[in-house]
Amino acid sequence: MSEKQSYAAGESVFQGGESTRHFYILATERIRLPLSEGGQVAYTSSAQTVSHLDVVPIESKGLQQILAGDPPSALIFYRHFAEFIGQRLSNSYKAIIFVHGERSSLTYG
């Protein structure tokens, strides 16, 4: 369903505004998601490599078909995916507080 792709440092993996066709599994952790001009995270972000990067792009439609054909495995997949996203959000929040300090009791998640 997919083959590993390699990118050199500074290469673009995808650009903001492109239609989403792949789910990317990173074999390494160093990737840059640039901020928009106003300093806010752009939800249709681009991705640029920081160092050599290996990714496995999985075509979205193919992944959806596989998961639809095996609901128990789909549940496990989405549970692990949700835990991963939750951990990334928590780490991002901690990094923001470390850099900027806690200025408010508001939370966004």
Image (tube, grey):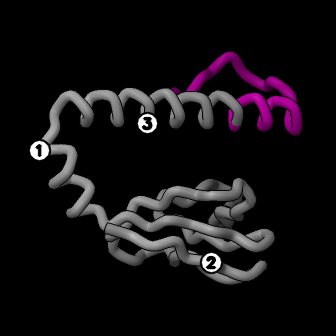
> What's the residue at 11%, 44% (across, down)?
69
Residue at figure coordinates x 42%, y 75% from the top left: 17
Q: Is residue 50 on the magenta stretch?
A: no
Magenta region: 92-109
Secondary structure at badge 1 equals loop
Badge number at residue 6: 2
Q: What is the count of numbered marks?
A: 3
First in sequence: mark 1 vs mark 3: 1
Q: Tell me if residue 20 comes above or below residue 104 in the rendering.
A: below
Q: Distance between the residues labelled 2 and 1?
A: 30 Å
In the image, what residue occupies the spot 74% across and 59% down?
A: 30
Instruction: Point out the tag, 2 or 1, that comes first from the N-terminus.
Output: 2
**Which of the 4 quarters of the picture holds residue 33?**
bottom right
Q: What is the three-letter code of the residue carrying label 2?
A: Ser
> What amino acid is at disc 1?
Gly
* Amino acid residing under circle 3: Phe
Q: Mark 3 points at which residue?
A: 81
Give the side of residue 47 with respect to residue 93, left or right: left
SS under mark 3: helix
Depth order, front residue of 67/95? 67
Using the numbered discs, state the Cα–Cα distance from disc 3 to disc 2 in whole angstroms. Answer: 23 Å
Q: According to the image, label 1 marks what residue?
A: 69
Residue 8 in the image: state x and y as whole percent. 73, 82
Q: Height in image: 22 above or below 8?
A: above
